[in-house]
Image: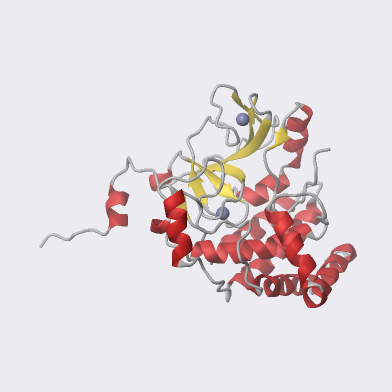
Amino acid sequence: MQRILPRGEIEALDHNVIPRVTLPDRDSLFATRAARLRQLAAGSPVADYLLLMAQLCDAQQRAIKDCTAPGASEDRIALSQAHGMPPLQAVGWPRDPLWRRILAQLVDDVAAGKDVPAEAIEVCKALRRAVDDDPESLEDLAEAILAEQDQGVDGAAAPFVMAALQVYWTDLASRFDDKQLPVVSPFGVCPVCASLPVASIVRVGGQYEGYRYLCCSLCATQWHMVRVKCTHCEDVETVAYQAIDGRTPAIKAETCDHCHTYRKIFYQDKDLQVEPVADDLASLMLDVLVGEAGYSRASGNPLLWHGSEE
Ligand SMILES: [Zn+2]
Ligand SMILES: [Zn+2]
């Protein structure tokens, strides 16, 4: 008897089909990021910061293990399908207080770590107190960070709050059924949570070979986008690529003369280990170079609060 393949397997046989999204792998995402940060810290002028963020990512990996945030209701999924909107839209989402418990877990974990700078321990302790005494201010801070608003955001606390939100949304996204995604979704934002991408990556291997994916700064979903096209304004005429001479060919800045922004693009065929958040954070020299050439970042790195451009 002939076997009828389930939908996913039929698509896997058709090499003309480009996989649209890759949902995050909760079992390895943060540990892989931590390991990459440690690797990149060697010889880096910002080694101390990269190592601190590696400790934070390790804490994230421990925190997501038992995390089960309440998912999207059937109504919300139906609404998102009807309107072509991301089903787990982060801004305005009815966050469960669970995310504050995740934050408490992260800052306790980091503060108890080895070789943590005194200033970082202070930030962790202040956040821990806020979890107990002032949850309202944390809710406001979380909403401002998710909406990328600068007002009232403490740059030292922001990466820790963002880290807790990442655990929450990575948990949601990793358990989401991607067959429930709307057929189309708005350009330039994550099809799952509507956050901005941190960077893009040209992947290797199987069906992904040579295709470019944008990487969500919040839930770590990757979604396909054609190459040589501005990830911010969709321009195809003025896109160009900048790199630092003598440095790794795996990292370039994709600049656009139409909107004057850039995002970094990573090439797995040049370095299989590239990790979007870690490599973006560790390549600040390229930001300086491209910034001096007159381009501004299209969006920030989740582990470094950039603040306002002015
Ligand atoms: Zn997302
Ligand atoms: Zn553009």
Residue 67 on image: x %, y %: 58, 73
Identified at 70% across, 72% down, the residue is 100
Which is nearer the eye, 162 or 272? 162
Which image quarter has ligand 2?
Answer: top right
Residue 310 on image: x %, y %: 84, 38
Residue 181 falls in which quadrant of the image?
A: bottom left
Identified at 85% across, 65% down, the residue is 123
Judge whether 156 appears above or below 65 on screen.
above
Judge whether 42 appears above or below 130 on screen.
above
Specify whether residue 54 is in view: no
Which is nearer the eye, 185 or 56? 185
Judge whether 7 appears above or below 235 on screen.
below
Residue at the far top: name it: 237
Residue 112 falls in which quadrant of the image?
A: bottom right
The reply, left or right, for residue 273 in relation to residue 153 is left
Residue 141 on image: x %, y %: 76, 60
**Numbered marks: total:** 0
Residue 290 falls in which quadrant of the image?
A: top right
